[in-house]
Amino acid sequence: MKDIEDLIQKAVELQNNGLVTGQIADELNVSRETVVWLLTRSKKEEITPAPKDISVNWNSIGKSAKRLHNISLALCDVVLEELEKINTEVDVVVGVAANGVPLASMIAYDLGTDLAIYHRKGQETAHAGHKGTISRNFGSVAGKNCVIVDDVITTGSTCMEVIERLREMDAKPRLVVVLVDKKGADMIANIPIQSLVRVVRLD
C-alpha cells in the first residue's frame, strides 16, 4: 500500500506544480485513467476500484548518462534487428518529448541518423483539434523513414498520435521502440512495436 500512497503524493505534487493529467501520466508512467484515480483518492472522495495499470519507475536509468547510453545501445540493437527483418533503413529517430528524447538522442547518435523531436498535443487543447508537432529546431521528417522512440507504452494513444502526425507530414514511420511496453501489442497503426521489456498482466 505504501507504493500507492507514494504515487498519490507524487500525483498531487505534480498537479500542484501546474501539470495536467497527461503530463502527470507521463511523469509517473501510468495511464491518464490511473492519474484521475490517484487524484480522486487523494481527496478521500468515494472512488471506483483502481484501474488495472502498472507504474514504471526507471529513474535509476534516467539519472545516469552512462546507464542511458547502455540502454540506448540495447535499443539500437533492437532497432537494427527489426529494420533488417523489414529490409528498411532509418533516416530519422523521432523522440517523444519529454521522456523519449534522451534515449532517442543517443540512439540517433549511435545509428548515425538525424534526430527529430515530437511535442505532444496538450490534453487541454486536444478537444479543439490541435495536434502535436515536430520541433523545427531538430531534423526534418518529410519523406524519410522514421523510428519513434518513447520510454513507455501504456495505452498506445501517444504512439498513435505520433504516427498519424508523421504520416500527415509525408514521413514514413517504420518502427516504434520503447523501454517498457505495458500495452502488449505487436503493432499499432500497422507499425511494429519493439521493447526491451514487455509487461504482461495475468489477470
Image: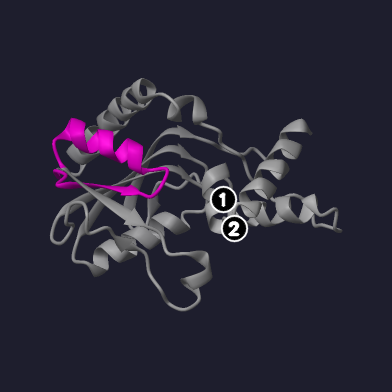
Residue type for callout 2:
Thr
> 13 or 98: which is nearer to us?
13
Residue at image coords 71%, 42%? 9
The C terminus, quarter of image = top right
> 170 or 136: which is nearer to us?
136
Q: Residues within 10 Å of mark 1 (few under 14, many from 20)?
A: many
- Image quarter of residue 189: bottom left
> 64 or 93: which is nearer to us?
64
Q: Position of residue 166 (x, y in %)?
A: 26, 62
Is residue 29 at all visible to an observer of this figure? no
Q: Which type of secondary structure does the marked residue at label 1 adopt?
A: helix
Q: Which residue is mark 1?
A: 25
Q: Which type of secondary structure does the marked residue at label 2 adopt?
A: helix
| Tags 1 and 2 touching, CB below 8 Å | yes
Q: Which residue is mark 2?
A: 21
Is residue 3 toward the left or the right of residue 177 in the image? right
Against 69, residue 26 (above or below) is: below
State which region is magenta. 88-113
Q: Position of residue 128 (x, y in %)?
A: 47, 79
As measured in the structure, the alpha-carbon distance from the residue carrying label 1 to the one carrying label 2 is 6 Å
Is residue 109 at all visible to an observer of this figure? yes
Residue at image coords 36%, 27%? 68
Label number found at residue 196? none
Is residue 194 toward the left or the right of residue 126 in the image? left
Magenta includes 16?
no
Residue at image coords 56%, 37%? 200
Circle count? 2
The N terminus, quarter of image = top right
